[in-house]
Image (cartoon, rainbow, N blue to C red):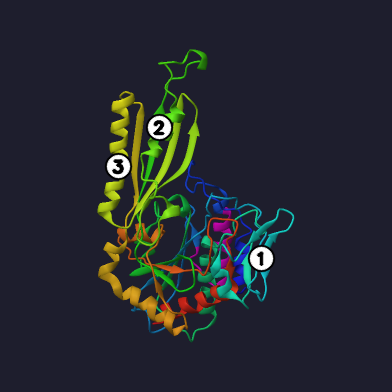
Amino acid sequence: MNVTERFLRYVSFHTTSDHTSTTTPSTENQKVLAAELVNEMKVMGIADAEVDEYGYVYGTIEATKGYEDVPYIGLIAHMDTSDAISGKDVKARIVTNYDGKDIVLNEEKNIIMRTKEFAHMTDYVGQDLIVTDGTTLLGADDKAGIAEILTLAEQLLNDASIPHGTIRIGFTSDEEIGAGADHFDVERFNVDFAYTVDGGKLGELEYENFNAAAAKVVVHGVNIHPGEAKNKMKNAILMAMEFNSMLPANEIPACTEGYEGFQHLSFINGNEEETVLEYIIRDHDKEKFNEKKAMFEKITTYLNDRYGTGTFELSLKDSYFNMKEKIVTHMEIVVRAEEAMKRAGVEPIVVPIRGGTDGARLSFMGLPCPNLSTGGHNFHGRYEYIPVQSMEKMVQILQEIIKA
């Protein structure tokens, strides 16, 4: 199979993760894809391919003769997709020789991907774009990474003329809910360094990411019949709105870019008696990150003073930290990726991740792990797409990276 055939096959698997689940992986469907990947790896010649009890897939490509002592390299991608939009029954199609115009994804539902909104579409005139029918995400995040890694693996196993050291492959579950590295066995993986193939636009190379935390605010109210509520009702919905209004209005994803951090209200539910707010907190700068968390605590204290102790209940939990502090002492692996991209005719784009990857946590677990592009755009939404040519070029870049 080529990289496109693999990708189209993988996106047919429904592997949405579930942040409310208490199991690992969070959804059984991820195990179905894991089993398929193990079977495919064994067929192509990866004899030790296996899936562990947590749904993680591992496998080894042995070094070519004479290169057993060069650094062991890991290549990692994740199997789950975001729950921001459905990933079930993905209907992917290829827009061949793209003409640079708006793409009608779904005529019946009038879902159109417009160049006015996504100007980067016009960078791919003449190429072949894989898109959805507008009712689901595509799954390039991160099934494109899996397809690219396994296409490289097949090339290496079929062509002994490509010199390389030992290559370890790892496919994780539940990355989209921040749990992709929870049970990753770094010691078992046994490599000197690794790369996650989980980025966006072709050429992106990332070794900085957000510091990340999750905040949950539970507002406890008092409900009284509206006709008798004067001086008695404490409407939890209104108090929750008051909490949110005290956060800086310009520090939200829609108002920030680059190194600018944010807090993002991702969930709200409740009634007059109890309302729950869930946030994610992000910043590349550790000091500013801590200031954002402290602001949540300060607002909670202030409103509890106003409405009564225990009215606002705050839970804060760190998710991951900026991998830069772990990568800066291993910049040779970033340079290796930059040079590989240039040899493949791609100009490296070194940018900070406005998010996180398994590589961030793995770097803090002792495995230096920058992030590479997959070639995709508009992840986590109905307008997600990926150029075929970008995936093909990523396979070439991976080959250049692992060459000894």
Q: What element carries label 1?
A: strand
Which residue in the structure is indicated by mark 2? 218
The image shows residue 149 at horizontal and vertical percentages of 50, 70
- Residue type at mark 2: give it: Val
Q: In the rendered structure, are the residues bearing label 3 and label 2 in contact, judged by CB atoms less than 8 Å apart?
A: no
Which residue in the structure is indicated by mark 1? 103
The image shows residue 54 at horizontal and vertical percentages of 46, 51
- Residue type at mark 1: give it: Ile
- Residue type at mark 3: give it: Met
Residue shown at 52%/14% (left/top)?
Answer: 227
Residue shown at 36%/26% (left/top)?
Answer: 311
14, 200: nearer the viewer: 200
Q: Is mark 3 on a helix, strand or loop?
A: helix
- Which region is colored magenta? 32-49
Residue shown at 49%/72% (left/top)?
Answer: 202
Label 2 CA crowd tier, 10 Å (few <14, some 14–19, many 20+):
many
Is residue 282 on the magenta stretch? no
Q: In the drawing, what numbered circle is on residue 295?
A: 3
